[in-house]
Amino acid sequence: MAKTEIRIGGLGGQGVILSGIIIGKAAAIYDGKHSTLIQAFGPEARGSACSAQVTVSDAPIGYPYVKNPDILVVMSRDAFVQFAPTLKDNGLLLYEEELVEPSGLPAGVRAYGVPATRFAEELGRRLVLNIVMVGFFAGVTGLLSYSAMEKAVLASVPRGTEDLNLRAFKRGYEHGQALVARA
């Protein structure tokens, strides 16, 4: 595997940073790869722009900043507007389909949407929309093993919420797998 650069964008309170932590943890701890994480967020606790930059590689990573991601995951319209122009040609866009309407994408970009907020609400807690997105990421990309991603989710969520978060992860994963199978 070559180096894969990922940017996750959304609003504070959507779990953007935790999503990046889970992906990086899955890579570095459970899949034996190298990973880095850079996080950025506004001064407000909730509602401001925030993003995570994750790099995953088989080899050590010399530069952790993501300028032109191979994979862009967006959970808000503002994140899409800000980061979509940076997505590499032939990159991959994963988006919350009820909050983002992709347009004007670079050449060859593949785009897959998931109703993550609705899935999270159906599971009983809107807060797990980020875990639905993490599962969707795993299901569409196949970048990291299902087992590594599942272990990283379990190691990263609050005690007592493991079952809910695993159901959210699986829901996103299965939706992603179904979309890829149809493509």
Image (cartoon, rainbow, N blue to C red):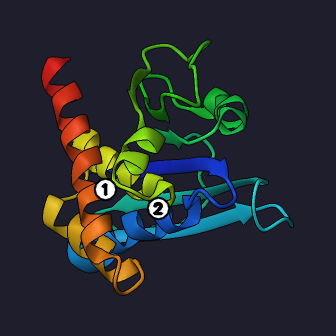
Q: Residue at x 24, y 59 (%)?
A: 167
The residue under label 1 is 168
Viewer-proximal residue among 24 and 133: 133
Query: Which residue carries the number 2 mark?
Result: 19
Q: Quadrant of residue 53?
A: bottom right
Quarter of the view holding residue 176: top left
Where residue 127 appears, as percent x and y from the top left, is 51, 60
Left or right of 8 in this view: 144: left
Q: Residue at x 49, y 35 (%)?
A: 96
Residue 18, labelled with which disc? none
- In the displayed structure, 182 sits above or below 137; it is above
- Residue type (three-letter) at the residue carrying disc 1: Ala
Measured as percent of width and height from the top left, residue 114 is found at: 39, 33
Residue 156, percent from left and from top = 39, 78
* Residue 125, quarter of the rendered image: bottom left
Q: Quadrant of the C terminus?
A: top left
Separation of marks 1 and 2 at Cα, in angstroms: 13 Å
Helix, strand or loop at disc 1? helix
Type of amino acid under label 2: Ser
Q: Image check: 95 left or right of 174?
A: right
Above or below, 110 relative to 114: above
- Viewer-nearest of discs 1 and 2: 1
Does residue 5 show up?
yes
Mark sitting earlier along the chain (1/2) = 2
Q: Secondary structure at mark 2?
A: helix
Against 131, is 109 above or below? above
How many numbered callouts? 2
Question: Do residues under tags 1 and 2 come within 8 Å of each other at their CB atoms?
Answer: no
Q: Residue at horizontal 13%, vertical 25%?
A: 181
Query: Which one is in front, 143 or 17?
Result: 17
Q: Is residue 33 left or right of residue 10?
A: left
Q: Residues within 10 Å of mark 1 (few under 14, many from 20)?
A: many
